[in-house]
Image (spheres, rainbow, N blue to C red):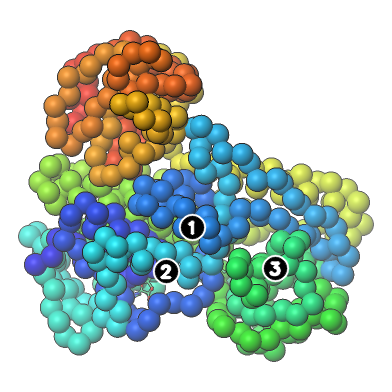
């Protein structure tokens, strides 16, 4: 009997496996493919995902392997329209990862697999789920080869075609447009300048081709819209390169991965059916515009991990698992709408090209800046209690911002103290007297006093903290409670 069986070793399953394993939960992660996937697919890791990956101990590796520049060269047919080169944002005390990071999904997955191995876990390749029965006491799953596995919970991280979702008969509501297809390929391109960042060509008839340099490699991720009847092969890449860029000197070769993407905008209406939970693409799929998919999956897993761990350990009631759907389903709904808006955006005709340069550049710059600040909030979620009249920059339901602090004479940062499976209580100028074993409690003080020293005054400014205010930060870095009376934090934890 294992506590949790995770089906699928994409970014969602791997994040959950790392999180549960470090919490000491017995889990298995099974993958139907015989070996790790090779494709570049999800290319953008956003700040909130990086904060989650920091907690799991891999943010540094991601930054070292990726590229934070996000530069873009925009072409209308053969004409170069503009370069977009926002300088990377400087890390602020409250946001140590202010930029999105570009790196191919296979690299993100390999970093997570290495981390899982360090924590003592491993992906079981070639062990696809073939069926399962879920009851009140647990789940019995069958794997390729016939092995039967008993698990207390099963998590479907098995991607857009999820067998688990189909077996449960869960509706996957939305739309598919068979005529909206794109070819995605990892290829070499000779003759294309890598220093300009991503090249995006849009043609007057609305077709596009994007070529994104893969960091620390000599290959590119090419995404090009397909016309009806076109095949997903290297010849198509070659024809699109010549036709859409107007350049005869660009030579594509050595395809490492080729795939056809179809427009699908679908999501489930429930993330939990008894002892089975859905996460990542198994629960929601949409267009790659906006770069949300992998990030949403990682953040689903990070939201679910601590809740599942507490329930399995008997430290919280099973109802806590319902808050996973309540918090994450609205995020998916918003993301589907956003990616659809972007997908359907049309490039205006040639006649207004001079205006287009100005408008499009500023729209794209605004979008890039907004993406950097992509922190979903759970302000109206069922685990959120905002019980203070004090006005700071954040509220309960927001992500707890980082801050420089000093503890026992050592300079550190709040994120270091949050790292791990516990809740963290910060009480300003007083001892909240919290003895709950799930919590690490600190008294926040100004310079020269004993406790957690707010060296730059950042914590006081962010939380509007006054004597007696307690901020209770959940294991996934969200502020669960802000309150001014000492009984509230203990009551909040008791209700879990
Ligand atoms: C061109 C493109 C660009 C994209 N760009 C971005 C981007 O910039 N940013 C972003 O965030 N996202 C992006 N995405 C989306 C991203 O790739 C997906 O959202 C992400 O892979 C979802 O992760 P997942 O772990 O939920 O599912 P998957 O990555 O699909 O993983 C599911 C895994 O489950 C396995 N599996 C399936 N069935 C079974 C079974 N029965 N038993 C065992 N294992 C099984 C599969 O083999 C697979 O390994 C992009 C996607 C595409 C196609």
Residue at 33% of width from left, 48% of height from top?
Answer: 303
Q: Earlier in the sequence, mark 1 or mark 2?
A: 1
In whole angstroms, how far apart are the C-alphas of marks 1 and 2?
A: 10 Å
Task: Identify the residue position indicated by label 3 in the image.
Answer: 210
Residue placed most toward the observer, 412 or 380: 412
Residue at 41% of width from left, 48% of height from top?
Answer: 54
Contact, CB < 8 Å: mark 3 with mark 2? no
Residue 243 picture location, percent across and down: 81, 79
Mark toward the viewer: 1 or 3: 1
Residue at 51% of width from left, 75% of height from top?
Answer: 39
- When the figure is inspected, residue 471 is found, relative to residue 474, above or below; the finding is above
Callout 2 secondary element: helix
Callout 3 secondary element: strand
Residue 188 picture location, percent across and down: 67, 80
**Numbered mark located on residue 318 in the image:** none
Observer able to see residue 422: yes
Task: Identify the residue position indicated by label 1 in the image.
Answer: 62
**Quarter of the image where the N terminus is located:** bottom left
Specify few, some or many for label 1: CA neighbours under 10 Å numbering under 14, 14-19, or 20 or more: many
């Amino acid at each position: 009997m294992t506590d949790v069986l995770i089906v699928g070793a994409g970014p969602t399953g791997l994040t959950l496996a790392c999180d549960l394993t470090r919490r000491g939960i017995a889990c298995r992660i099974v993958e139907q493919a015989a070996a790790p996937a090779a494709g570049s697919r999800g290319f953008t890791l956003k700040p909130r995902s990086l904060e989650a990956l920091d907690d799991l101990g891999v943010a540094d590796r991601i930054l070292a392997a990726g590229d934070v520049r996000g530069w873009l060269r925009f072409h209308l047919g053969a004409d170069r329209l503009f370069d977009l080169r926002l300088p990377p944002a400087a890390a602020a005390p409250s946001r140590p990862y202010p930029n999105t990071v570009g790196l191919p999904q296979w690299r993100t997955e390999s970093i997570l697999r290495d981390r899982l191995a360090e924590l003592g876990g491993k992906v079981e390749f070639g062990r696809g789920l073939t069926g399962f029965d879920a009851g009140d006491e647990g789940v019995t799953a069958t794997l390729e080869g016939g092995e039967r596995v008993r698990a207390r919970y099963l998590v479907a991280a098995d991607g857009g075609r999820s067998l688990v979702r189909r077996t449960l008969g869960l509706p996957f509501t939305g739309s598919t447009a068979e005529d909206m297809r794109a070819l995605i390929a990892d290829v070499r391109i000779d003759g294309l300048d890598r220093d300009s960042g991503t090249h995006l060509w849009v043609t007057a008839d609305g077709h596009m081709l994007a070529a994104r340099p893969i960091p620390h490699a000599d290959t590119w991720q090419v995404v090009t819209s397909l016309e009806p009847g076109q095949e997903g092969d290297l010849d198509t890449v070659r024809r699109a390169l010549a036709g859409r860029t107007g350049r005869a000197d660009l030579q594509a070769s050595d395809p490492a991965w080729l795939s056809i993407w179809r427009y699908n905008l679908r999501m489930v209406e429930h993330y939990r059916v008894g002892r089975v939970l859905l996460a990542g693409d198994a629960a929601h799929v949409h267009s790659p515009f906006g770069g949300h998919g992998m990030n949403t999956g990682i953040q689903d897993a990070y939201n679910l991990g601590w809740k599942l761990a507490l329930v399995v350990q008997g430290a919280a009631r099973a109802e806590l698992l319902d808050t996973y759907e309540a918090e994450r389903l609205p995020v998916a709904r918003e993301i589907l709408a956003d990616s659809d808006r972007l997908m359907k955006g049309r490039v205006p005709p040639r006649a207004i090209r001079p205006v287009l340069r100005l408008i499009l550049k500023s729209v794209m710059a605004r979008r890039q800046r907004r993406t950097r600040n992509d922190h979903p909030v759970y302000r109206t979620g069922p685990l959120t209690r905002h019980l203070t009249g004090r006005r700071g920059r954040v509220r309960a339901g927001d992500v707890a911002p980082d801050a420089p602090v000093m503890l026992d004479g050592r300079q550190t940062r709040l994120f270091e103290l949050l790292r791990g499976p516990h809740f963290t209580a910060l009480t300003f100028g007083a001892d909240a007297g919290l003895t709950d074993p799930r919590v690490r409690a600190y008294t926040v003080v100004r310079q020269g006093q004993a406790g957690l020293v707010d060296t730059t005054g950042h914590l006081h400014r962010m939380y509007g903290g006054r004597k007696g205010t307690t901020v209770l930060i959940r294991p996934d870095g969200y502020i669960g409670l802000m309150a001014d009376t000492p009984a509230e934090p203990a009551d909040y934890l008791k209700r879990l």
